[in-house]
Image (cartoon, rainbow, N blue to C red):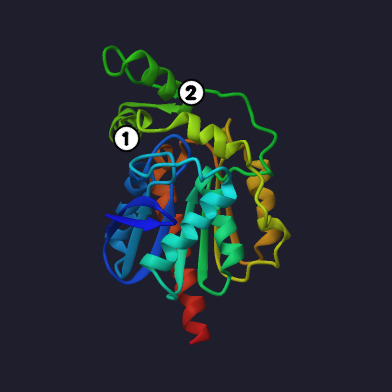
Amino acid sequence: METTVSGVSVHYAEYGSGTPVLALHGAGVDHREIAGALEPIFDDVPGYRRLYPDLPGMGRTPAPETITSNDDVVDILLGLIASTIGDEPFHIVGQSYGGYLARAIASLRPDQAVGLALICPVGPQTRDMPQHEVLVSSVDLTGALDSDLEATYRSYFVVQTPETLRRFQEYVAPATSLADESSLMRIFSHWELRDRPEAAKAYPHPVLVVAGRQDATAGHTGPSELILHYPRATLAVLDRAGHALIHEQPNLVRALAADWLMRVREAADDKS
């Protein structure tokens, strides 16, 4: 599906009906990675309308020269919310770079974004990243990937098994060639947001923060400290998990996300 926001054709996938959930993927991929991780959760938890946009410069959403910063990306997402969700309360999920954007939207729309989930979030707080370390190596990559994709797989996953290779081939690899690297460099060169999420009032709704103990991209120190801004936060730092945590620990992510959805629903019921 597509909708036009400020002259930009924003592509997104949509599934189900009910309470809207806006899910934002990380850098260098497209909506398929986070959709592949979250959709099995909603198989068991009905009543949600899931929206998975391709962020500007990735997937099928272009990033024209008018988009020069993360503030511009947030504005595009706010326009997407206005055109697809309207004034209805919604939940928001962000993985990696998407977590930075999700935090911004939650801080700008705290009365409408009634639940926030962050998976391996990056942002100004990113620090103390460990060296990339492969914990499990039980896959034969001979002939499975070209040299560039093999390098990407090896540097992304700390758990390298036939199952994580399958998930990489299905949800990550098809999107890597669609990333507009020059546009992303332009946007990321203006990384800091005008309205810093950590400068806003404490976010009052249920939050989930999940970090990988071996995450060499986002680390776990910065994500752990985010709970200072979220008094209703659950924090989980998972061993045997790097930046590809959603692929390496899918069962734990599924359980934590189901708990978060339950907490958001309970909070909404208490206010009704």
Amino acid type of disc 2? Ser
The correct choice, above or below, for 195 with respect to 242 in the image is below
Relative to 214, is 53 on the left or the right?
left
- Looking at the picture, does residue 185 appear above or below residue 138? below
Residue 141 tag number: none
As rendered, which of 30 and 67 lies closer to the eye?
67
Amino acid type, mark 1: Arg
244 to 251, vertically: above or below? above
Residue 36's quadrant in the figure? top left
Residue 241 % position (x, y): 50, 36
Pointer 2: what residue?
155
Q: Residues within 10 Å of mark 2 (few under 14, many from 20)?
A: some
What is the C-alpha distance between the residues marked 1 and 2?
Answer: 15 Å
Q: Residue at x 58, y 56 (%)?
A: 103
* Mark 1 element type: helix
- Quadrant housing residue 46: bottom left
Please name the residue shown 70% across and 67% down the image.
Answer: 201
Is label 2 in a helix, a strand or a loop? Answer: helix
Please give the label number shown on residue 167.
1
Relative image position of residue 138 (x, y in whole percent): 36, 21
